[in-house]
Image (spheres, rainbow, N blue to C red):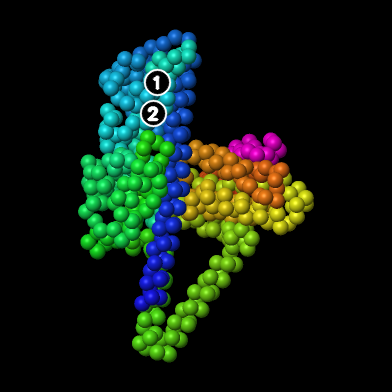
Amino acid sequence: MIFFSSVDSAVKKNTVELLHSNVEQQSYHFEAVIELQFNTLEVASNYISLQPQQLTSEQMEDMLQALSSTDTFGRTMLILPDGTGYTSDGITSQVADREYFKRALSGERAISNPISSSVDGDNKVVLAVPVHRDGEVTAVLGGSYDVGALSNLLFADIYGGKGYSFIVAADGSMVSTGTGKADWAKRNIFDAYGEVAFSKGSLDQMREDFQRRSSGSIIVDNKGVGSYLAYEPLNCNDWILCYVVSEENAQSSYEFIIHYELLLGVAFLLGVGVLLVSFQQLNARDRRRLERKAEEDPLTGLLNKESTARSITDWLNEERCKGFQVLLMVDLDHFKEINDTYGHATGDLVLKKAAQVLRGVFRETDIVGRVGGDEFMVFLKNVGNPEVVQRLMSTLNNRIRTIGVDELPQETLSCSIGAAFYPRHGKDFTLLYENADRVLYEAKRAGRNGHAVFEADS
């Protein structure tokens, strides 16, 4: 009983840690996409600012419709200082009392809560940026954006898409319910979870975490059905990104442990015969473990070169491989000089730390491997928005520069990155690798500590 209880406790602990890691990673991707949408609006805002005179009604309508036609924003609006808004679909509205408008008019970026938005849909919010002219804010440019669809997209590949995500404010009110809990649209999360029993955490702890902007997790038991909830604060208003998955799906990777527990119980009842069967299964498990070890790079724990290439090729042949895929080649700058000057022990430490950064930047579902001495390969699966890749490469450049190694007090690490897109730059692994490797060396020739995307005439 002690053994079974310890195993169950360890499974729950590891499940919670993995779930929280996934939610944390998706929160970074969520913020990166929102940042990209703000940048899109600000490009249009700058265009308006640079015009020698106020836009005519026809010019304004053309610009708003162009923004809406990108499939990024459901509707766009140009709002005058008196709060009169002109939308891309020809509707005029008054939004002077909206908080997002007031904040943008003061010169800041702003994002609304759905309850304060006049656009359609509970999951739609308004992103707003100021329009400057001669140093003053003369208008506000806004666009409606479906944050519910975004959060669903980010979590589509986690646990086989069997969980669901939603966004709440710090007071527990719903911002976006996603598709899994549409009936919660008008509810408060604290009211909803006040109706269930907690096997880990408590409602008071969740309230405190929300107010303190802390991440956390709970395990609930709703009429015999267990589920995990992990939450992570976002840098958007006071929003919290939440993800819920059933205990069965969350622990699916640990089913083999339950299997062995049953075998152990039967072994005590059936004796030596069943023990022999158990030993055979244990040997099979050991063989699988050894096979996994053979696929790993012994220094960093990442996939080795052969396993990386095989995993990417296998994915490209799967039905789940849809839309944009990205192959990144990452090379540590001046690594040979570090090895020669400070020794291989220090060089190995640098490689281990670089591998940790790669694991932290990219998703659990992405393929990350070490394919050379100081060369790494990353394959991003089913990238919903190709522009996110630029953001991720910049993040990786920045994270590598923050690596601290005591043995290198005077050195700042950096890396160069080359990217090739499937199917645009190649429909098989070999061609993607060649193009990404080619543009990697263009990035190094351009001065290192940067990144580049392959172009047909590269």
Dot 1 surroundings within 10 Å: few (below 14), some, or many (20 or more)?
Answer: some
Instruction: State the residue at coordinates (27%, 41%).
Output: 173
Is residue 449 within the magenta segment? Answer: yes
Report whether residue 441 is seen.
no
Nearer the observer: mark 1 or 2; the answer is: 1
- Relative to 409, say whether 276 is above or below: below
Q: How many marks?
A: 2
Asked whether 197 or 278 is in front, the reply is 197
User: Is 410 left or right of 245, judged from the image as shown?
Assistant: right
- Relative to 193, say whether 57 is above or below: above
- Hey, which residue is sitting farthest bottom in the picture? 272
Give the image location of residue 119, x and y in percent: 28, 29
Give the image location of residue 77, x and y in percent: 34, 23
Q: Amino acid at mark 2?
A: Ala
- Relative to 146, say whether 215 is above or below: below
Calculate the distance from the C-alpha at mark 1 to the C-alpha at mark 2.
Answer: 10 Å
Is residue 292 within the magenta segment? Answer: no
The span picked out in magenta is: 440-458
Asked whether 178 or 170 is in front, the reply is 170
Query: On the image, which quarter does residue 218 sit in?
Result: bottom left
Q: What mark, if any, has residue 110 been given in the picture?
A: 2
Q: Which residue is mark 1?
A: 106
Label 1, secondary structure: give it.
loop
Instruction: State the residue at coordinates (75%, 52%).
Output: 342
